[in-house]
Amino acid sequence: MLSLGEHGLSWMPAKGAWGGMAGFNEVQMEQLRGLLAPMQTKLTQQGQTLTQLGQTLTQLGQTLTQQGQTLTQQGQTLIQHVQTLTQQGQTLTQQGQTLIQHV
């Protein structure tokens, strides 16, 4: 007799019958299929949920990558502006020194 309890699937063999699947008759096999079907359904649902979560995480990862690339580009633009301002400052300093020498 097959049963599904707190500790999983158990099978009490018929009188004198012992062994693995060889000890199962067709009725017992049907009972086993009936007990396993809900577990298979549950595992399939859980697998689908995990797949959806994986897809969501992939999309989030792609979004974060795009945002990181945007921030990198903005950072490079800021660096260029700072370099331009630094050069302009150095030019103004040189011009100031030239004016002081001519005064």
Image (spheres, rainbow, N blue to C red):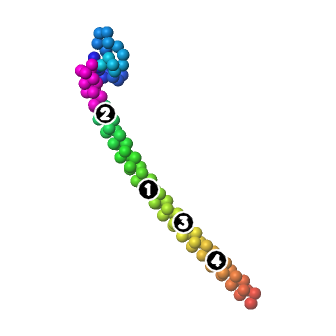
Nearer the viewer's eye, disc 3 or disc 2? Answer: 2
* Residue drawn where x is 68% and y is 84% of the image: 95
Are there few (<14), some (14-19), or many (20+) residues within 10 Å of tag 3?
A: few
Q: How many marks?
A: 4
- Magenta region, residue range: 25-38
User: What is the number of the mark on residue 40?
Assistant: 2
Q: Is residue 55 above or below residue 43?
A: below
- Who comes first in sequence, dot 4 or dot 3? 3
Residue under pointer 3: 75
Asked which secondary structure carries label 2, the reply is helix
Residue under pointer 4: 87
Asked which secondary structure carries label 1, the reply is helix
Identify which residue, 53 or 90, lies in the foreground: 53
Nearer the viewer's eye, disc 4 or disc 2? Answer: 2
- Who comes first in sequence, dot 4 or dot 2? 2
Identify which residue, 9 or 86, lies in the foreground: 9
Q: Quadrant of the C terminus?
A: bottom right
User: What is the number of the mark on residue 62?
Assistant: 1
Nearer the viewer's eye, disc 1 or disc 4? Answer: 1
Q: Is residue 83 left or right of residue 73?
A: right
Marks 4/3: CA–CA distance: 18 Å
Q: Amino acid at mark 3?
A: Gly
- Who comes first in sequence, dot 2 or dot 1? 2
